[in-house]
Image (cartoon, rainbow, N blue to C red):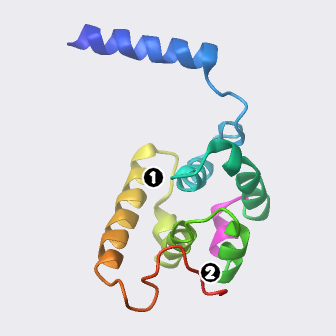
Amino acid sequence: MKQDFKKISSQVVDWYLKDGRHNLPWRKKVTPYRIWISEIMLQQTQVKTVIPYFNAFIKKYPTLQKLSLATEDEILASWSGLGFYRRAKNIFAAKNEKMLGIFDNSQLEIIKIHKALSLRKKKHKGKKGKKGGKRGGSKRG
């Protein structure tokens, strides 16, 4: 079993080194924050669509500290055109709940944030029909 894992792992790494997309903006200056933002943007959205939004978002909010100063409307405005606005609202909710303070340079922390946001999403689904229950909507009209 261990040999199979090593073989598969080696094949994946070889494939990535040969054919992987090395030029993606979130693969440059890799940080947990940049990976987190890219993963949220890439949910149900094509890579070619995300790239300009990611670049603009990171230019405006290059660090967690800058993001923590943003209002929900500012985050939604930066997201405008990308769709699925619940993702942007979850970013705002994460910063409001001080969840971003647990970020460090480990994948485990990113996974904790993702799980916490998934739990928020499940709770939100139970409140459909109440304020904010409309998928894809925004406060901006």
Whole-percent x, y for residue 115 in the image: 35, 59
Residue at figure coordinates x 35%, y 78% from the top left: 124
- Assign the N terminus to one quadrant of the image: top left
Residue range corresponding to the magenta coloring = 62-68
Q: What is the crowding at mark 1: few (fewer than 14 residues within 10 Å), some, or many (at least 20)?
A: some
Which residue occupies the extreme left position in the image?
1
Front one among 96 and 74: 74
Q: Indicate whether 83 appears above or below 52.
A: below
**Image check: 30 left or right of 58?**
left
Total marks in image: 2
Whole-percent x, y for residue 25 in the image: 72, 41
Label 2 belongs to which residue?
72
- Assign the C terminus to one quadrant of the image: bottom right
Is residue 88 within the magenta segment? no
Amino acid residing under circle 2: Glu
* Kind of element beneath mark 1: helix
Please identify the dominant SS of the magenta region.
helix
Front one among 88 and 106: 88
Label 1 belongs to which residue?
110
Whole-percent x, y for residue 104 in the image: 51, 52
Q: Indicate whether 15 appears above or below 35.
A: above
Amino acid residing under circle 1: Ile
Front one among 52 and 3: 52
Q: Earlier in the sequence, mark 2 or mark 1?
A: 2
Q: Indicate whether 76 appears above or below 48.
A: below
Q: Indicate whether 29 appears above or below 1.
A: below
Is residue 65 within the magenta segment? yes
Residue at figure coordinates x 64%, y 40% from the top left: 30
Image quadrant where residue 81 sits: bottom right
Inter-mark Cα distance, 2 to 1:
21 Å
Q: Nearer the viewer, mark 2 or mark 1?
A: 2
